[in-house]
Image: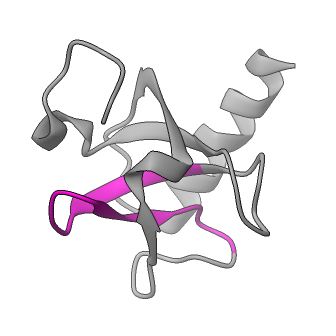
Amino acid sequence: MIRYAMSFDDVVGSIAVSKSGNDKGSAYVITKVVDDKFVLVVNGENRLLDTPKRKNIRHLSVTKNRTAATSDLEIRKVLKEFGKRSE
């Protein structure tokens, strides 16, 4: 599933970019592994820690960038900085 040398459980805290869907190209932080196909993701704006989005892991491009952000404000800042670096 994941094309890196990390296990599926190690993706929590990783920054991922959506590869498909209405949110294609959007960056998220993975907060929880639901099962072997789905994870919960947040972006600190319209997908908050209280209401994460359920996303198929195959529809995400998981990066090697990680964060320990614990609030929506911190997540927004991390993803904004990630967007600046990836341009």
- Name the quadrant containing residue 33: bottom left
Q: Is residue 30 magenta?
A: yes
- Name the quadrant containing residue 56: bottom left
- Name the quadrant containing residue 81: top right
**Is 39 placed above or below 53 here?**
above
Where in the figure is residue 30, as x and y percent of width and height?
A: 38, 52
Q: Looking at this rendering, what residue extends furthest in the right direction?
A: 87
The residue that appears at 15% across and 65% down in the rendered structure is: 35
The residue that appears at 44% across and 78% down in the rendered structure is: 52
The quarter of the image holding the C terminus is top right
User: 45 or 17: nearer the eye?
Assistant: 17
User: 49 or 63: nearer the eye?
Assistant: 63
Label the magenta part by its dominant secondary structure.
strand
User: 58 or 18: nearer the eye?
Assistant: 58
Where in the figure is residue 63, as x and y percent of width and height?
A: 48, 25
Task: Magenta stretch: give its range.
Answer: 28-45
Q: Is residue 31 magenta?
A: yes
Q: Looking at this rendering, what residue extends furthest in the bottom direction?
A: 51
Q: Is residue 19 left or right of residue 72?
A: right
Where in the figure is residue 26, as x and y percent of width and height?
A: 73, 51
**Is 5 placed above or below 31 here?**
above
Where in the figure is residue 80, as x and y percent of width and height?
A: 73, 41
**Is 54 placed above or below 14 here?**
below
- Color scheme of the displayed model: one colour
The residue that appears at 13% across and 29% down in the rendered structure is: 7
User: 50 or 3: nearer the eye?
Assistant: 3
